Amino acid sequence: MAFFSVDSGGTDSTGQSLFLPTRYAASLWAPGTLNGPAVCALAARAAERDHSVPGFRPARFTIDLFRAARDVPTATRGRLLRNGGRIKVAEVDVVQFVDDTEVTVARSTTVFVKEAANPPGERWERSPEMIEFRPPETDSDDPLPWFGTATADGTIEWSQDMGAHQNAQRTWLWTRAVSTVVGERPSSFERSVISGESTSLVCNWGSEGIAFINCDLTVALSRLPVGPRIGVEAASHVEVDGISTSTTNLYDSDGQFGVGMVTGVSNAAATIDFTAVDTGGRYSEA
């Protein structure tokens, strides 16, 4: 399962590979459009493949989603904005080709930071007792996501039935990212970005469904995740006048490794009601 396949028949005008969206990249917002994780994954893949160097780690990924990406040939265009001794910054455009016209649908910035020893001294961190996230016991080969909802006694109730978790309670997700490109295993960085995009889902999802669509994503990473699954925990959500801001904590089997943040805009006319749509098959797998 992957979001894109490589178009073996050609390249764009700059010689960059063309990628063809698969059914796993399809969005539920509108027919013929691509989901956020697919677009973010392609940008993250390009940044890491073209601009990462030994000793530097991707520490922040930010992408602005300018417009809805369509189910058409897609490419990436990257450039190094800063090449410092401790910080390197790469910019990647996600471009699509519609009626012989090139359209930039998203632009990302990835900050690579040089690894070093932590400075001396002690600083505050959440203690293990303060961490509420406890992943469900599940088969590691199970490709489908698990959804969690807070119960009255403070525990997390897990299941793979999305409709059962459509409420106004705090939400968790224990997910396994698909590949960005057919034939490739997603890197830990790609998986962080793909799962981090679910910040919009777990925070903007309410009792009537999801009616905020995110126009950006930021993932900040203190380390890269280990293991096949990533946990996404709703940390904060504020909405005023049709604008929402949301943050999540990102976990793997060893604990928290990063945070996610999105800005959402009201898209109530296209609300996705997960109690009424088929959330099996392609959507759950993606």
Image (cartoon, grey):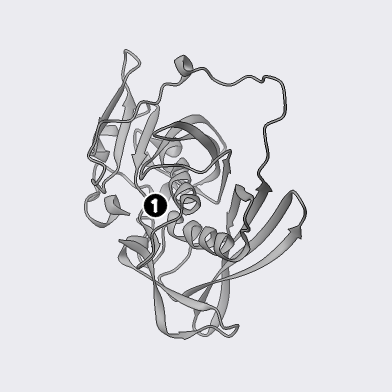
Vertical relation: 118 (above or below) 154: below
Toward the viewer: 242 or 216? 216
At mark 1, the secondary structure is helix
Q: Is residue 89 visible?
A: yes
Q: How many marks?
A: 1
Residue at image point 31% right, 19% down: 151
Residue at image point 43% right, 42% down: 226
Residue 1 horizontal/vertical position (percent): 30, 61
Give the image quarter of residue 172: top left
Give the image quarter of residue 79: bottom right
The amino acid marked with disc number 1 is Ala
Left or right: where 271 falls relative to 248 = left
Residue 234 horizontal/vertical position (percent): 45, 31
Left or right: where 24 falls relative to 58 = left
For disc 1, the marked residue is 270
Q: Where's the C terminus, which quadrant? A: bottom left
Residue at image point 66% right, 60% down: 90
Residue 38 horizontal/vertical position (percent): 43, 59
